[in-house]
Amino acid sequence: MQKVRFVNPQKQYQDHKDEFIAAFDDVLSRGAIVMQKDLTEFEERFASFCGVKHAIGVNSGTSAIWLGLRAAGVKPGDDVLTVAHTFIATISEIYLIGAQPILLDVGYDYNMDVSLLEKALTPKTTAIEPVHLNGRLCDMEMLMDFAKRKGLLVVEDAAQALGASMRMADGMVKKAGSFGNAGAFSLYWAKAFGGWGNNGMLVTNDDTIADKARFMRYNGEDRQTRKFFYHSHNLLMDNLHAALLNVKMNYFPQWLERRRQIAARYQEGLAGIKQVQTPQWNDDRFTDIYTNYVIKAQRRDELKKYLDENSVETLISWPSPTYDEPLFTDPKLNAEYGGKPRLVAVSGDTDTLPETEKLCTEVISLPMYPELTDEEAGYVIEKVKEFYG
């Protein structure tokens, strides 16, 4: 068995090479570099896929988070409720607006423990930023009910959840990004739907937020009047990237189905290992997309070393909590942004988040991408079983 890659963009490129080259040649032959029809088409298709009115293409998921918070109305001095078990950009973009994050502990599915929202609320809280981790939605029914009762904005960090959905109590099925005031997606190359480099997308059903976001992604300029209305950044998605993503969009639904097939194979193959907990939650309201296939594993670090030695690439996303990073623990670094964030666990305000810290010692991501073969997935399962004997 050759090395089982954690992700394999080379294989996807080879499978669709002629289409990618044709799109590349078409864009450059037309000189269609900035804000051309390819971007417009991709935004329309993306919005339709998510079930929203507007999609605004930007240069990264990080930019999409910042843009969503700003355009939705989060201001300096506000408090924003989010989680610690996430990539640092989720938290950094709150600080960079001048707001303060309040970090909640997570629940059984690695997502925000929404039962903590009341406990975390402050007089300055204006927004919630839920994170849909690993391709599974946060419990958005409970979260949106709380937000509506308290008059809070909701900006979804859906970076890892394009296509994930939840069936609501009224029977309606809604997709990631369509619940709140806005939703931010990462189209980073290693995501379930990634471009060739850094890309991102902001979605919304709010016309005012969409208009603001379109101005703010291009230095605050209204491209029709050539007048400037906001101090902002150049965050625009390149038209060439949009053209290449349009090619990928043709295949994305079948890629999602393949991810679910691989996840089912892992679930069946790993089910008998008592030292491993697989990400199956027995809640049929949710349809996951498995951006990552993350297991909880005893002796996690030893397992990773064993898999590395046996040519299986894996990933440990966050071996320590985000609030233990130097930018929070070094007073000189942290003072610039207003101090260390408040932490909220089941027990109340704490210095640590118990569930978050436990996950940092247990979770490991196995290879997951649509081009992964059944033979390769079987080899991964075999090696995990072998390790635990």
Image (cartoon, rainbow, N blue to C red):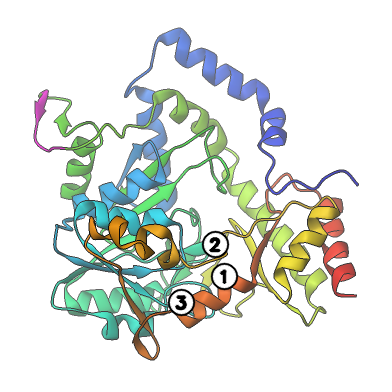
Label disc, if present, on residue 134 of the rendered structure: none
> Contact, CB < 8 Å: mark 2 with mark 1?
yes
> Contact, CB < 8 Å: mark 3 with mark 2?
no
The one nearer the camera, 254 or 386, is 386
Q: Of helix, strand and loop, which mostly describes the magenta segment?
A: loop
Q: Which residue is mark 3?
A: 106
Q: In terms of image quadrants, where is residue 123? A: bottom left
Q: Secondary structure at mark 1?
A: helix
**In terms of sequence position, does the residue under pointer 2 or pointer 1 come before the other?**
2
**In terms of sequence position, does the residue under pointer 1 or pointer 3 come before the other?**
3
Q: Is residue 88 above or below residue 243?
A: below
**In terms of sequence position, does the residue under pointer 3 or pointer 2 come before the other?**
3
Q: Is residue 39 above or below residue 109?
A: above
Can residue 100 be seen? yes
Which stretch is magenta?
Answer: 226-231
The one nearer the camera, 49 or 122, is 122
Check disc 1 and give the amino acid type: Cys
